[in-house]
Image (cartoon, rainbow, N blue to C red):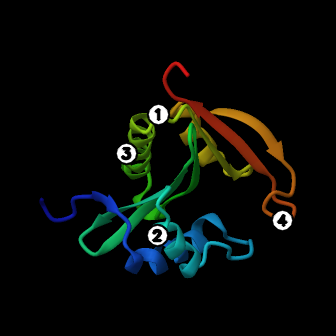
Amino acid sequence: KHPGAVTLRPARPQDARAMAEMSRDQIEAGLDWRYTPSRIAALIGEHDTMALVAGAGPHILGFAVMHFGDDEAHLVLLCVRPAQRRRGIGRGLLDWLLESARVAGIRTIGLELRADNAAALAFYRRLGFVQGQAVAGYYGAGIAAQRMMLRLGAG
């Protein structure tokens, strides 16, 4: 590995605080902080959830969390530090999770994002996600969610 190289690895319990703070500052800005360190640590420990971090040395640059069901998966969180965006980090995290989902026989992946997050909407559209319904007030504080879905394989 060369210095500054971004590596992906499963999240560890000691990553929970940094992941939670990124969620608070980037995803949940202006909302109640729901993905606290203890909640992230619980997600990391769940057997049907995969949590990944993208790092360079000791620094977490991004992370993703996906919950796996029998034939559907749900992307719970995907976050990349603003200064690190447009470097392929989010795509790398999502590619790892999508490949894991395919191997697990998952047919569809769903997610919700803030309806006012145009950059994230465009990112998911580029990866083949299609828009579903908008859900008014999903995040509270009058902030709507946009549901999106990706079908995997021929299922």
Residue bearing the label numbered 4: 140
Residue 100 image offset from top left, x and y in percent:
40, 42
Between disc 3 and disc 1, the foreground one is 1
Q: Which mark is residue 154?
A: none
Q: Given the image, on which type of amino acid does mark 1 rest?
A: Gly
Q: Answer left or right for 88 relative to 24.
A: left
Is label 2 in a helix, a strand or a loop?
A: helix
Indicate the quadrant containing the C terminus: top left, top right, bottom left or bottom right: top right
Chain-order first, disc 4 or disc 3: 3
Q: Answer left or right for 40 relative to 29.
A: left
Whether residues under marks 3 and 1 lie with C-beta atoms below 8 angstroms apart, the answer is no
Residue bearing the label numbered 2: 45
Residue bearing the label numbered 1: 105
Whether residues under marks 4 and 2 lie with C-beta atoms below 8 angstroms apart, the answer is no
Disc 1 to disc 2, how far (Cα)?
A: 22 Å
Give the farthest residue toward the top: 154
Indicate the quadrant containing the N terminus: top left, top right, bottom left or bottom right: bottom left
Q: Answer left or right for 69 relative to 8.
A: right
